[in-house]
């Protein structure tokens, strides 16, 4: 069953400007070391950073409830499977929030789709609960 959905669109140029202005300060506050390594290895790092920024926003929206607060940026991590498929790894308060919204007897998972068409990057997230085996 679907527990939550979230989407976000991000202006790549805006992320590029923020990186130019704040560089490591912005990157370390917003992205995990793994995300930074992945993005920096790309031909156009700003595109990869923008997709991950949009993904964090989309996941936060999908996990949000009536009384939930904000999440730490680094509690939502975007990784890639060997095939290139993006996946979400939750840490800290984001992991706790997922556990809180999943009904007893179910396990939670997050499906993520990322896309970019400069100057925009977009993410779509679905939180799903499946019966535990």
Image (cartoon, rainbow, N blue to C red):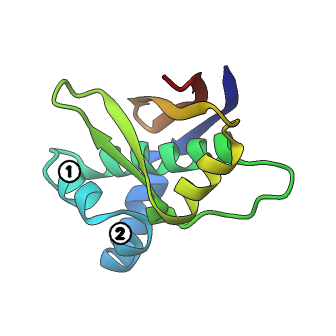
Decide which of 33, 133 is in the foreground and name it: 133
Residue 4 coordinates in the image, percent (x, y): 69, 33
Q: Is residue 35 left or right of residue 113?
A: left
Relative to 15, say whether 59 is above or below.
Answer: above
Q: Where is residue 19, by image quadrant?
A: bottom left
User: Which residue is rendered at x = 50% and y = 65% of the image?
Assistant: 92
Q: Nearer the viewer, residue 43 or 124?
A: 124
Establish if 120 lies above or below 68.
above
Q: Residue 27 carries which label?
A: 2
Q: Indicate left or right for 18 with 44 as reference.
A: right
Identity of the residue drawn at 33% across and 63% down? 32
Residue drawn at x 28%, y 55% is 35
- Secondary structure at badge 1 equals helix
According to the image, label 1 marks what residue? 38
Tell me where residue 85 appears, x and y as whole percent. 29, 27
Is residue 123 at all visible to an observer of this figure?
no
Specify which label sits upstream in the sequence, 1 or 2. 2
Q: Which mark is residue 128?
A: none
């Amino acid at each position: 069953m679907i527990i939550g959905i979230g989407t976000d669109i991000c202006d790549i140029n805006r992320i590029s400007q923020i990186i130019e202005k704040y560089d490591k300060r912005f990157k370390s506050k917003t992205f995990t070391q793994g995300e930074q390594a992945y993005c920096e290895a790309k031909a156009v790092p700003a595109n990869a950073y923008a997709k991950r920024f949009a993904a964090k926003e989309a996941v936060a929206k999908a996990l949000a409830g009536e009384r939930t607060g904000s999440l730490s940026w680094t509690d939502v991590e975007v990784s890639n499977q060997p095939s290139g498929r993006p996946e979400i790894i939750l840490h800290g308060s984001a992991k706790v929030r997922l556990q809180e919204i999943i009904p007893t007897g179910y396990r939670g998972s997050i499906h993520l789709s990322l896309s970019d068409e400069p100057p925009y990057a977009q993410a779509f997230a679905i939180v799903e609960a499946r019966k535990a085996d």
